[in-house]
């Protein structure tokens, strides 16, 4: 099992992650995660206007959801 740590805190036990923690948790680049949030493809919260927060459970659901790929034959 992978262990994600940020400032000596295990990210798998935190319920809400900030942007930097979400980058570390997902393995996405900053620009790709921001692109997903801008396109509203990944759930995020902006309670104070600028700062982005993510629910860890929703990130897990996003990372494990199955995308259907249509065959073009």
Image (cartoon, rainbow, N blue to C red):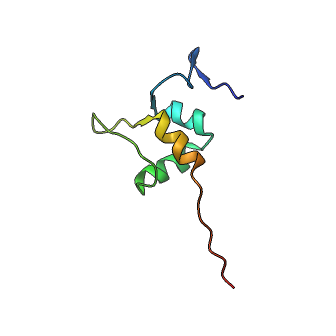
Quadrant in which the N terminus appears: top right
Q: Position of residue 13 (x, y in %)?
A: 53, 22
Residue extending furthest toward the bottom: 73
On screen, residue 2 above or below 32: above
Residue 72 higher or lower than 31, as above or below? below
Q: Residue at x 62, y 69 (%)?
A: 69
Q: Quadrant of residue 47?
A: top left
| Residue that extends furthest to the top in the rendered view of this protein | 8
Residue placed most toward the observer, 12 or 44: 12
Q: Position of residue 16 (x, y in %)?
A: 43, 29
Q: Residue at x 57, y 25 (%)?
A: 12
Residue 35 is left or right of residue 67, and the answer is: left
Q: What is the total number of numbered labels drawn onto the structure image? A: 0
Relative horizontal placement of residue 63, taking residue 52 as reference (left or right): right
Q: Give residue 37's position: percent from left, percent from top.
A: 43, 49
Q: Residue at x 51, y 40 (%)?
A: 59
- Seen in the image, is 73 located left or right of residue 43? right
The single residue placed furthest to the right in the displayed view is 1
Q: Residue at x 59, y 39 (%)?
A: 26
Q: Position of residue 31 (x, y in %)?
A: 53, 48
Which quadrant is home to the C terminus? bottom right
């Amino acid at each position: 099992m992978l262990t994600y740590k940020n400032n000596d805190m295990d990210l798998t036990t935190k319920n809400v992650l900030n942007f930097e923690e979400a980058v570390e948790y997902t393995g996405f680049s900053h620009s790709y995660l921001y692109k997903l949030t801008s396109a509203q493809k990944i759930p995020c919260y902006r309670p104070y206007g600028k700062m982005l927060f993510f629910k860890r459970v929703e990130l897990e659901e996003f990372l494990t959801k199955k995308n259907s790929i249509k065959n073009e034959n």
